[in-house]
Image (cartoon, rainbow, N blue to C red):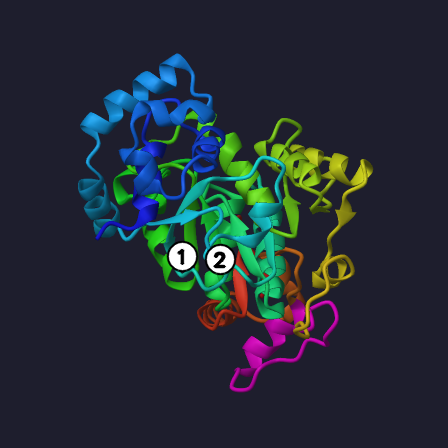
């Protein structure tokens, strides 16, 4: 037996049948099956245009619901109806609601508090460090982290959530079948996200990413969460569009301040000037969006203590490192260790996940 949501998916495949038009059809019929099989004369109250009526006639003769059901099952894609129990609840609050969305992965996370993290595709080492720290704190506090699976800050946020054992949701500007995942380099990341979270899209298979599909994606990113954090954004960044959409949806907007000389932070610094809340750590977020779970204290709040089992050289270097990048030459000078001993200790600290090379032979403490 074909699930009723499959018939609404078939409507989504018709040219010109977007969310609003499908909602108007839903208002006229008790089920998707009834709508799909109804005579054209039954669509009078749906106010379909001449082109929409022609698309409906042509589509119902060429689209096979049984084939579509098999395709969705093969790709492990579920159709989530806007009035169904599995639909993300915050998205129901938007002024322009959704008739349906497509999801892949773990659907038990929608009820948890969610924060979106977005930013520049051309991120800096500072942006990477800020994203990893903030997302780790969000995951520890119990937040789901949402983003857009793009290059840059988006992918760093997804990776950090996974690495921290948290849940992450990726909203795509294309469909969820493997052949359409964009960028292609992130197919492996998308599969990892499904293990601890979900992929979400409003596009049916097989829909490639196009410039016009990303604004719709940004609306879901902003709408699915209680707040959006922007980490590094130039003056014309798409992340600023997501921040505006978050404001329009009555969500909180946060921004991580950056160096005044960095073009990558010009957009975020302007957001702060215009009223976005500054984010330095999880405490700034919890002031606006409380959560029952007690968050783990941040590195700035907890004295830095060396883990057990470190060598004397490793303890010495770890005590020197901080969240500001430090060059190897400065580390050697401050530790009074030889080049070989310092390099070996840094390598071991990296392997233990206690230090990280952020580029240019500059290290930070994790």
Residue 297: in magenta span: yes
Residue at horizontal 54%, vertical 70%? Answer: 354
Q: Secondary structure at mark 2?
A: strand
Left or right placement of residue 196 versus residue 241 in this view: left
Q: CA distance from mark 2 to mark 1?
A: 6 Å
Q: Secondary structure at mark 1?
A: helix
Residue at horizontal 47%, vertical 21%? Answer: 47
Left or right placement of residue 302 versus residue 159 in this view: right
Rendered location of residue 245, percent (x, y): 64, 36
Residue of label 1:
193
Residue 89: in magenta span: no
Between 317 and 158, the one nearer to me in the picture: 158
Task: Examine the rendered structure and indicate whether residue 297 appears above or below residue 128.
Answer: below
Residue 181 in view = no
Of the two numbered discs 2 and 1 on the same chain, state the one appearing first in sequence. Answer: 2
Evaluate if marks 2 and 1 touch, with contact meaning CB atoms under 8 Å apart. yes
Task: Examine the rendered structure and indicate whether residue 263 appears above or below residue 155.
Answer: above
Rendered location of residue 223, percent (x, y): 59, 44
Residue of label 2:
168
Residue at the front extreme? Answer: 41
Between 358 and 235, the one nearer to me in the picture: 235
Circle 2 packing at 10 Å, graded few (<14), some (14-19), many (20+), is many
Residue 56 in view = yes
Q: Which residues are magenta?
A: 296-320
Residue at horizontal 60%, vertical 43%? Answer: 222
In the rendered structure, find residue 290 and report the number of the disc placed on it.
Answer: none
Rendered location of residue 175, percent (x, y): 35, 39
Where, by quadrant of the figure, is residue 329 drawn? Answer: bottom right
Left or right placement of residue 10 versus residue 267 in this view: left
Rendered location of residue 131, percent (x, y): 59, 53
* Main secondary structure of the magenta stretch: loop
Residue at horizontal 63%, vertical 70%? Answer: 335
């Amino acid at each position: 037996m074909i699930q009723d949501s499959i018939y609404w998916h078939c409507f989504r495949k018709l040219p010109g049948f977007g969310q609003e038009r499908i909602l108007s059809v839903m208002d006229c019929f008790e089920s998707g099956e009834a709508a799909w099989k109804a005579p054209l004369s039954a669509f009078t109250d749906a106010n379909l245009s001449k082109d929409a009526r022609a698309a409906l006639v042509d589509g119902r003769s060429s689209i096979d619901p049984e084939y579509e059901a098999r395709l969705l099952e093969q790709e492990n894609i579920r159709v989530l109806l806007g009035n169904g129990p599995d639909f993300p609840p915050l998205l129901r609050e938007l002024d322009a609601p959704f008739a349906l969305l497509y999801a892949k992965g773990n659907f038990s996370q929608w009820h948890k508090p969610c924060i979106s993290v977005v930013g520049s595709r051309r991120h800096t080492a500072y942006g990477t460090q800020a994203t990893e720290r903030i997302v780790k704190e969000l995951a520890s506090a119990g937040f789901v982290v949402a983003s857009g699976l793009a290059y840059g800050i988006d992918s760093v946020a997804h990776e950090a959530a996974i690495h921290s054992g948290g849940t992450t949701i990726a909203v795509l500007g294309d469909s969820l079948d493997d052949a359409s995942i964009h960028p292609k380099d992130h197919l492996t990341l998308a599969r990892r996200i499904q293990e601890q979270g979900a992929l979400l899209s409003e596009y049916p298979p097989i829909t490639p990413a196009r410039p016009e599909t990303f604004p719709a994606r940004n609306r879901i990113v902003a709408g699915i969460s209680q707040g959006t954090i922007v980490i590094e954004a130039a003056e014309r960044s798409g992340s600023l569009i997501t921040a505006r959409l978050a404001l329009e949806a009555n969500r909180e907007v946060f921004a991580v301040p950056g160096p005044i000389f960095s073009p990558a932070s010009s957009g975020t610094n302007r957001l702060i000037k215009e009223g976005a809340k500054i984010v330095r750590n999880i405490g700034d977020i919890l002031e606006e969006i409380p959560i029952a779970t007690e968050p783990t204290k941040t590195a700035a709040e907890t004295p830095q203590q060396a883990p057990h089992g470190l060598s004397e050289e490793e303890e010495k270097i770890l005590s020197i490192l901080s969240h500001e990048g430090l060059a190897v030459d400065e580390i050697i000078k401050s530790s009074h260790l030889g080049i070989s001993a310092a390099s070996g200790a840094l390598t071991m600290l990296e392997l233990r996940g206690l230090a990280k090379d952020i580029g240019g032979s500059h290290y930070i403490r994790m």
